[in-house]
Image (cartoon, rainbow, N blue to C red):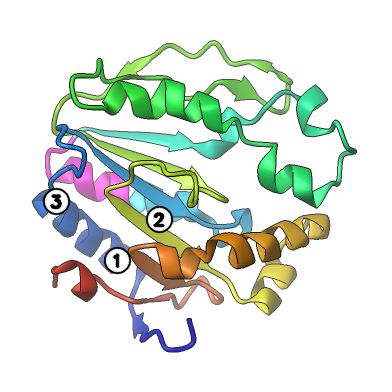
């Protein structure tokens, strides 16, 4: 990680270059829909980059569907089985990985229906959202954002990791009890070494990234 070269960039320019790269990208599974991850702790505010990227893609005529991992949390009875502030449960048990496979990724496989569930569970009301399915047509792009997205064998065609240094993560995370979960993620998954693109987001006003050169893009 220490040997990575970062280039200063604005969020808007980053979104534009990512959208341009996605225009040339072919789904790795042989299907006709791209699947993109924006991975990072809540403090990294990945939803803001996703919103910019979605806008850029739609301006290029690409259908886009945005999914937040937050919408696929397990019921409170399962999340809080070991207490409300258990970092190991937060890391491994809060998000319903099986539901993401079933309701998001399987429909986007080659020959799939393209009918994706936007969300499954409302963590505030602690009940099913009952949201209607959304069809992502051929040529469309799925943008999934949230923490701990890498390491599950999700078939991402492009993965972006928003990296915060331990000091920045501690400073910007309100729920400090979650910090050991992110340390475990760093150790077990090495998201900066796994992702296609890494963004250094310690100062949200001045991001820097590794760029797209290693992916054969400008």
| Foreground: disc 3 or disc 2 | 3
Q: Residues within 10 Å of mark 2 (few under 14, many from 20)?
A: some
Residue displayed at 24% across by 19% down: 112
> Which residue in the protein does label 3 denote?
25
Q: Are marks 3 and 2 in contact (CB under 8 Å)?
A: no
State which quadrant residue 122 falls in: top right
Q: CA distance from mark 3 to mark 2?
A: 19 Å
Q: Quadrant of the C terminus?
A: bottom left
Q: Are marks 2 and 1 in contact (CB under 8 Å)?
A: yes
Instruction: Return the x and y of residue 36 as percentages of the image width and height.
Output: 33, 46
Residue displayed at 21% across by 38% down: 29
State which quadrant residue 206 falls in: bottom left
* Span shown in magenta: 53-62
Give the structural element (helix, strand or loop) at label 2. helix
Give the structural element (helix, strand or loop) at label 3. loop
Q: CA distance from mark 2 to mark 1?
A: 9 Å
> Which residue in the protein does label 1 denote?
14
Q: Residues within 10 Å of mark 1 (few under 14, many from 20)?
A: many
Residue displayed at 27% across by 46% down: 55
Is 121 situated above or below 55?
above
Q: Of marks 2 and 1, which one's residue comes earlier in the chain? A: 1
> Which residue in the protein does label 2 denote?
49
Give the structural element (helix, strand or loop) at label 1. helix
Instruction: From the image, give the main secondary structure of the stretch colored magenta.
Output: helix
Is 62 situated above or below 150?
above
Q: Nearer the viewer, residue 106 or 52?
A: 106
Instruction: Return the x and y of residue 217 as percentages of the image width and height.
Output: 14, 68
Instruction: Return the x and y of residue 193 as percentages of the image width and height.
Output: 44, 70
């Amino acid at each position: 990680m220490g040997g990575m070269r970062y280039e200063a960039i604005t969020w808007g320019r980053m979104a534009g270059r990512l959208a341009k790269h996605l225009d040339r990208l072919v789904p790795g599974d042989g299907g006709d829909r791209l699947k993109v991850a924006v991975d990072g702790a809540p403090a990294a505010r990945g939803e803001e980059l996703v919103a910019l990227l979605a806008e850029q893609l739609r301006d290029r005529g690409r259908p886009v569907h945005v999914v937040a991992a937050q919408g696929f949390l397990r019921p409170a009875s399962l999340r809080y089985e070991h207490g409300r502030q258990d970092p190991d449960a937060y890391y491994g048990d809060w998000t319903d990985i099986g539901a993401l496979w079933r309701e998001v990724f399987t429909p986007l496989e080659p020959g799939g229906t393209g009918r994706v569930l936007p969300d499954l569970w409302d963590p505030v009301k602690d009940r099913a959202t009952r949201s209607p399915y959304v069809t992502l047509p051929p040529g469309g792009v799925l943008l999934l954002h949230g923490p701990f997205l890498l390491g599950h064998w999700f078939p991402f065609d492009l993965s972006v990791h928003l990296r915060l240094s331990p000091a920045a993560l501690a400073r910007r995370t309100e729920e400090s009890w979650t910090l050991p979960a992110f340390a475990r993620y760093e150790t077990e998954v090495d998201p900066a070494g796994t992702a296609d693109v890494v963004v250094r987001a310690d100062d949200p006003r001045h991001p820097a990234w590794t760029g797209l050169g290693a992916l054969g893009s400008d």
